[in-house]
Image (cartoon, rainbow, N blue to C red):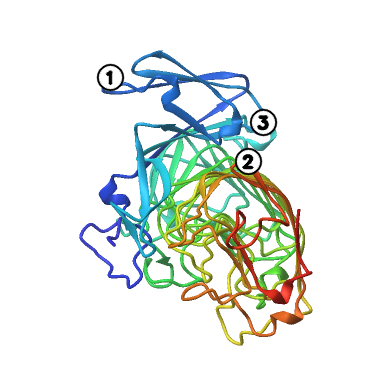
Amino acid sequence: MFDPAQPGREYNLTDGDGVTIEVNAGINMAWSQFQYGRDVDVRIVSTDGSSLGPASNVVVRPVDLGLVVTSSGADRIDIRIPYHDFGARFSIEFQNDLYTYRSDGTEYVSEGGIIVSEEPRNALLIFASPMIPDDLIPSKTSPDTQVVKPGSVTQQSIGSKPTLYFEAGVYWMEKNGILGKDHIILHPNTHYVYFEPGSYVKAALEFTTRRADFYTIGNGVVSGEHYAYMANTIQDYTAVKDDRYSLRMFWHQSVMDNQTWHCIGPTLNSPPFNTMDLHPMHHTLHEEDNKVSAHIRDYKQVGAFYFQTDGTQMYNGTVQDVFWHVNDDAIKLYHSGAQLDRLTIWKARNNAVIQMGWKPRNVGDVSVNKVRIIHNRWIQPSAYVPSAILGASPIYADPKDIDISRKMSLRINDLVCEGICGALMTIAPLQNFDLEIQNVRFEKMHNDTVVRLGRSVVGMNAGEGIDNYTPGQENLTLGIAIRNWTIGGQRVDGTNWREDQLGQLYIHPDFYGDWTIE
């Protein structure tokens, strides 16, 4: 891969950077964001006069938004967006501009294999955001506010006032005149960052405040386009992976349990690694010991093509009304008290949509409601990075022990997977489960007998790359209840769930009697 900030600098990464066929296929992604307070019409016009219509050539995803598309001319389409307090975030897809992703079970191929997805070659996303409440917009004239002017930003130009205000315009971060070699580290006094609509900030943002509440507010864009993949902040931002020190676009490295992050409105473009983390000051081996809270709303993510570009961490608190393009896991259920509602996910090839594994966990009071997966395109079945909607990876460190004293207690409701869907779940049981999955609708599910992307594997050694059996798992309780799961309109129940039937569930006999489907 090439360093985006240093033309000609190339990294030879053993496992690559996650970008595969996209460059040769001409895959790209554009978006437009606006604020609205009433019903609006969005008109899309081709710049070269080529035909966009008729209206039947256009699919808006998620499809159950029910948006009306009309065509007032061959080179234009109109979409009516009714006003909602929670806004609207969607993909506009022209059926004559789709790229077909095919897999031979090892890699994407241009011919043969199986079709794993059909996605826009030239993606166009629309984000209609409700107005930011007046009481969340800081005064530009307050003595507590530093107003940043568009242009070059350096660490020295960021002061110590409580509020940092980015006006509309384009910003880029430099260090000694070089791009991609620094990020904005806020002064401990600074607890509030505001982005005016029209602001585009090419820099990551790190809080250091001890204030109980800290804020990232506004309908601006924060972009990682100048950073190398895995930008390692203690190795000159080079492409060297470090789970602790590779750059996050939204970051705090020493939060306390009584702190809460509030995030409303931003769009994140081209993240270089995991997108957001609030690391605790007092670190333990278990993420759930981090009791920080977060409330995230109207957060959008685009251009996430690198391997480990994921969704935010889901801390105690809420995540609502988000649209995330991700390569890595979108929804990380590592913390108790996370309440998630109205999430739209465009998923690439690395890891599960919902991840709850890697180590034994003790997590409860978690609900995930109204998830819309508009695309997914796994290449091959995998247990380590689960190729499934719901995944729990095996233990990645030693000792590889289960923990019968821990339990994951989760509720997942109203999940829709559009297009061709991968498996429902691939789980390595590491602790007890109390998991309810209900009202799940797959438009289609893979059912080929070669690649087998539709097969769910739970606690089984199912062959090379898909072994999620853990010694001692027979001492665990797999309390999973699946209710009202349909594939192509047909319900999966006690008569058709097995791996050679509609549901393709392959679950270890250790757990027979522990789980139910109806």
Q: Where residue 61 sits in the image (x, y, percent)?
A: 52, 35
Secondary structure found at label 1: loop
Q: Where residue 148 sits in the image (x, y, percent)?
A: 47, 42
Question: Please, is residue 4 above or below residue 256 in the view?
Answer: above
Of discs 3 and 1, which sits in the foreground?
1
Question: In the picture provided, is 452 more to the left or to the right than 409?
Answer: left
Question: Please, is residue 368 above or below residue 332 in the view?
Answer: above
Question: In the picture provided, is 239 more to the left or to the right than 323?
Answer: left
Q: Which of pointers 3 and 2 lies earlier in the amino acid sequence? A: 3
3D distance between C-alphas at marks 1 and 2: 40 Å
Question: Please, is residue 262 above or below residue 352 in the view?
Answer: above
Q: Which residue is mark 1?
A: 49
| Residue depicted at 36% across the width and 45% down the height | 100
- Residues 2 and 200: in front is 2
Q: Which residue is mark 3?
A: 134
Q: Which of the 4 image quadrants contains residue 219?
A: top right
Amino acid carrying label 2: it is Gly
Question: In the picture provided, is 46 more to the left or to the right than 195?
Answer: left
Secondary structure found at label 2: loop
**Badges 3 and 1: C-beta atoms under 8 Å apart?**
no
Q: Which of the 4 image quadrants contains residue 289?
A: bottom right
Q: Where residue 400 sits in the image (x, y, percent)?
A: 61, 84
3D distance between C-alphas at marks 3 and 2: 45 Å
Amino acid carrying label 1: it is Gly
The N terminus sits in image quarter: bottom left
Amino acid carrying label 3: it is Asp
- Residues 94 and 308: in front is 94
Q: Which of pointers 3 and 1 lies earlier in the amino acid sequence? A: 1
Residue 274, can we see it? yes
Q: Which residue is mark 2?
A: 489
